[in-house]
Image (spheres, helix red, strand yellow):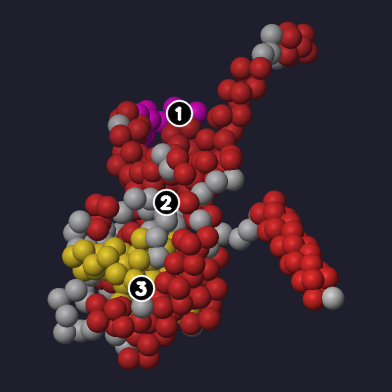
Amino acid sequence: MTLNSIVANFQTFKLVDLLDILIIAFLIYQLLGIVNRTRAGQLAKGALIVLAVYLVANILNMRTVTWLLNSLLQVGLLTLVVLFQPEIRRALERMGQTDQWAYRFFNKSRYNDTSLKGAWRSAIIAICDAAERFSETKTGALIVLERNTNLSEIVRTGTPVNSAVNLEVLGTIFYEGTPLHDGAAIIENGRIKAAGCVLPLSNNLDLGKDMGTRHRACLGIAENSDAIAIVVSEETGIISMAKNGVLIRHFDRQTLYTRLVDEMIPKETASEKSAAEGWKARGKRLLNWVNAKEEEEQQ
């Protein structure tokens, strides 16, 4: 491409072309982020190796290998859809989360509700207390905290509870003698929505042999949604948490509490803090004015 052709291309460059480039760059960035955070990274590396072999075979005129890879690449798109089905589903669900986009662009979210923040804080304290007790007694437990992805399909597989989250209720649900202890408890808006729910199992082959069905279900729901899942092993008592298709192990009560607060209760923005400080200052001035008036009347 000559310099004149480059200059000619820039002369015909329009605003819509810039928007086109930004959209493609954003999609590629999001795709790389999804691949990097999940087991799809290994599949992507395999696809790149197949593509590299195809290019080499084509250059060296290896007819048999080229024919075989051509046949494979003809159904390559369908194969990729099948292989990356969980990741594609999660990406489309996130694109459809209107409240998440509203938070990014307009700084509005259902989690900014003060009463909801209080409900989540109380629920997190109860969950951490329960997880610590379950760990000490080696009681198996699986708790899912709903965020933006709607889990109504999962809720329908269990028994409706609609209860406040406290240590006693969680202890009853996961007591070995109850019919609900083998399933998951779903926490929505700081309340127990349902218990005994059936979760999708992960096919991740990297899970250790000491992790059974509960851990696969914990990781499975984190692969198929943006929910936070907590599991306590009945064999070892180890507390683990899954998020975005990644299982993190060996939590204690304090680290679990800190992590859940960071994930479920958003921090105040600078504008929210300044607004709160402004209201406090106004309230303080009003209180001083009332006190001054009372002193004048007494004199």
Above or below 147: residue 91 = above
- Give residue 94's position: percent from left, percent from top: 43, 44
How far, Cα to Cα, is label 1 from label 2?
Answer: 47 Å
Q: What kind of residue is marked 1?
A: Asn
Question: In the image, what residue occupies the spot 38% across and 71% down?
Answer: 230
* Disc 3 + disc 1, Cβ < 8 Å: no
Query: Which residues make up the magenta segment?
Result: 58-70
Question: In the image, what residue occupies the spot 29% across and 69% down?
Answer: 163
- Give residue 18's position: percent from left, percent from top: 65, 22
**Residue 58: assigned label:** 1
Q: Secondary structure at mark 3?
A: loop
Q: Earlier in the sequence, mark 1 or mark 2?
A: 1
Q: Can residue 218 be seen in this snapshot?
A: no
Closest to the observer, 298 or 244 = 298
Decide: few, some or many residues near mark 3? Use Cα within 10 Å; few <14, some 14-19, many ≥20: many
**Residue 165: assigned label:** 3
Q: Is residue 173 magenta?
A: no
Q: Secondary structure at mark 2?
A: loop
Mark 1 vs mark 2: give the one in front: 2
Mark 2 vs mark 3: give the one in front: 3
Decide: few, some or many residues near mark 2? Use Cα within 10 Å; few <14, some 14-19, many ≥20: some
Q: Quadrant of residue 185?
A: bottom left
Q: Earlier in the sequence, mark 3 or mark 1?
A: 1
* Disc 2 + disc 3, Cβ < 8 Å: no
Q: Main secondary structure of the magenta part?
A: helix
Decide: few, some or many residues near mark 1? Use Cα within 10 Å; few <14, some 14-19, many ≥20: some
